[in-house]
């Protein structure tokens, strides 16, 4: 839904050894990401939206690491 509505290139979900989930999404550019973030990331369900925003409350002022991909060496998953 985020790809369709907001132009994300997709994401990967990881779990660390402590059981925390870490999501990494890729966007074509920062402007596209900013528009999606400002629109509360497609969370039309009020309970989901509140949980998303609450999860960000304990993080830094800018909650995400915004980085540019310099080398993409991941292989696509075979179908």
Image (cartoon, rainbow, N blue to C red):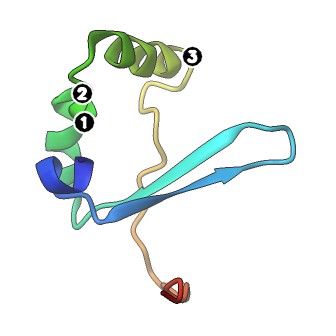
- Foreground residue among 58 and 36: 36
Label 1 and label 3: CA atoms lie apart by 17 Å
Work out whether 75 lies above or below 43.
Answer: below
Q: Position of residue 7 (x, y in %)?
A: 17, 58
Among the 4 quarters of the image, the one containing residue 52: top left
Q: Real-space Cα distance between discs 2 and 1?
A: 5 Å
Residue located beneath label 2 in the image: 40
Do the CB atoms of the residues marked 2 and 1 lie less than 8 Å apart? yes
Quarter of image, res 75: bottom right
Q: Tell whether label 3 touches label 1 (CB within 8 Å).
A: no
- Left or right of 31? Residue 52 is right
Which residue does the numbered mark 1 point to in the structure image? 37
Any part of residue 31 in sight: no
| Residue that appears at 73% across and 37% down | 20
Can you see residue 18?
Answer: yes
Depth order, front residue of 75/59: 75
The residue that mark 3 highlights is 58
Q: Residues within 10 Å of mark 2 (few under 14, many from 20)?
A: some
Q: Is residue 62 left or right of residue 77?
A: left
Nearest to N terminus: mark 1 or mark 3: 1
Image location of residue 4, percent across then percent down: 16, 55
Q: Are marks 2 and 3 in contact (CB under 8 Å)?
A: no
Residue at figure coordinates x 52%, y 26% from the top left: 60
State whether residue 11 is above or below residue 74: above
Residue density around tag 1, few if under 14, some if 14–19, many if 20 or more, within 10 Å = few
């Amino acid at each position: 839904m985020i790809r369709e509505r907001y132009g994300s290139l997709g994401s990967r979900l990881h779990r660390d050894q402590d059981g925390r989930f870490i999501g990494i999404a890729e966007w074509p550019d920062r402007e596209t990401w900013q528009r999606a973030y400002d629109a509360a990331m497609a969370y039309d369900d009020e309970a989901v939206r509140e949980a998303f925003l609450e999860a960000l409350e304990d993080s830094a002022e800018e909650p995400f690491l915004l980085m540019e991909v310099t080398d993409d060496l991941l292989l696509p998953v075979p179908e």
